[in-house]
Amino acid sequence: MSSHHRLLTSPMLAHPSAFDYRHLSQSQKTYISALKGLTDLVFDPPSPTPSPVPSCSSGSAIAAPSSMCPLPLYPETTYLDSARLLVLAADAADTAAVYMFLLLYRQLVFSDASAPGDQSRVNHADLLRLKREIRDISSSHLGHCFKYGSSDAPSSDPADRDKWCKVKQDIVLQTALRAKEARAPTSTPSSSALHAHVPDERLLKLAEGWSDTHIRPNSALSTMLKNRVRDAVFSQVLALTFPSTDASLGSVRALEAMSAPSISAAGLASGMEPLADEIRSLAERLARLAHIHLGVYLPLYEQEDILSDASS
């Protein structure tokens, strides 16, 4: 299992009872590796392979596979969790996209050389407002901006690509506008109503160039930010499903109760605080899925000794 190898390379796990993955029992390693594997499936879903939809449904094509349609390249044990994994993957992509646009906002605000270190220009309320506006503009499936939001993005439907290019442009425009407002000194009187709602050309070009470079499939920055969100979600899933009340870590207690302490923004990396609600929701829903999934399949994983298979 690839997740086992990744945990071995970063063995100190973020958990209320910080511990070294390498020092856990085989059963605990199997359990946590499965947790990590489910999280990775949500944030890095396998690329879909062409398959005829009628094999799963006798009716017309559907927008997303049902829970009774196996997903290509996914583990066979996730067969009954297909629909949940797809919904979580879409929400994870949306969260990563919002994170990307919020970072763009910060970059634009601090691109003004006159006061590059003035942190008071960015406050939590403004970030939450921009987050709501981003979601209002996109309506849903904001993560599609990464897949189809550039003119050279692969898509079987040009209309779909054009739609998401337009959505991305609208969000970039709104982000540049809010950045302009944050950069303007409060003592400066408002200009005409027209100019008050239009970002300056230089700022907009900077925003468009940044988005064209980074908000695209598999860009280095988007991959890094997605991995940050993934790691934050995994840490909270682990806290929810591996309770710190078992100080000795002598046995896996993941299936007893979902009673971890309340998750707050305090434990998130800098810049992720406005995403606390999204990360909490993803973690709680993924923890519930893992609670059910491992209640059925953990004995099988232990019996099959998947960690030995991964190292062979």
Image (cartoon, grey):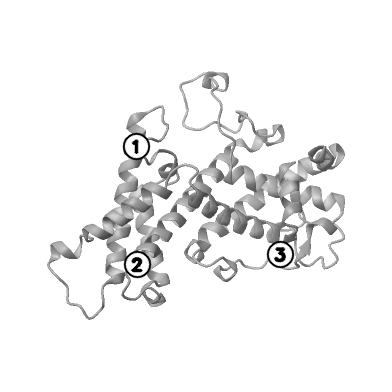
Read off the residue under disc 2. 109
Q: Name the residue: 72% across, 68% down.
A: 16
Q: Is residue 139 visible?
A: no
Which quarter of the figure is the N terminus placed in? Answer: top right
Q: Earlier in the sequence, mark 1 or mark 2?
A: 2
Residue 44 lies left or right of residue 166; in this view the side is right
Residue 20 lies left or right of residue 180; in this view the side is right
**Label 2 secondary element:** helix
**Looking at the image, do the residues carrying marks 3 and 1 touch, with CB atoms under 8 Å apart?**
no
**Label 1 secondary element:** loop
Q: Which mark is residue 151?
A: 1
Q: Name the front one of labels 2 and 3.
A: 2
Q: Earlier in the sequence, mark 3 or mark 1?
A: 3
Q: Could you tell me how far apart the alpha carbons at marks 2 and 3 are, in whole angstroms?
A: 34 Å
Q: Residues within 10 Å of mark 1 (few under 14, many from 20)?
A: some
Q: Residues within 10 Å of mark 2 (few under 14, many from 20)?
A: many
Q: Nearer the viewer, residue 295 or 191?
A: 191
Q: Name the residue: 53% across, 19% down.
A: 52
Q: Is residue 265 visible?
A: yes
Residue 97 lies left or right of residue 10; in this view the side is left
Q: Name the residue: 52% across, 67% down.
A: 270
Q: Position of residue 50 (x, y in %)?
A: 53, 23
Q: Residues within 10 Å of mark 3 (few under 14, many from 20)?
A: some
Amino acid bearing label 1 = Ser
Read off the residue under disc 3. 15
Amino acid bearing label 3 = His
Q: Could you tell me how far apart the alpha carbons at marks 3 and 1 are, in whole angstroms?
A: 42 Å
**Label 3 secondary element:** loop
Q: Earlier in the sequence, mark 2 or mark 3?
A: 3
Residue reaching furthest to the bottom: 187
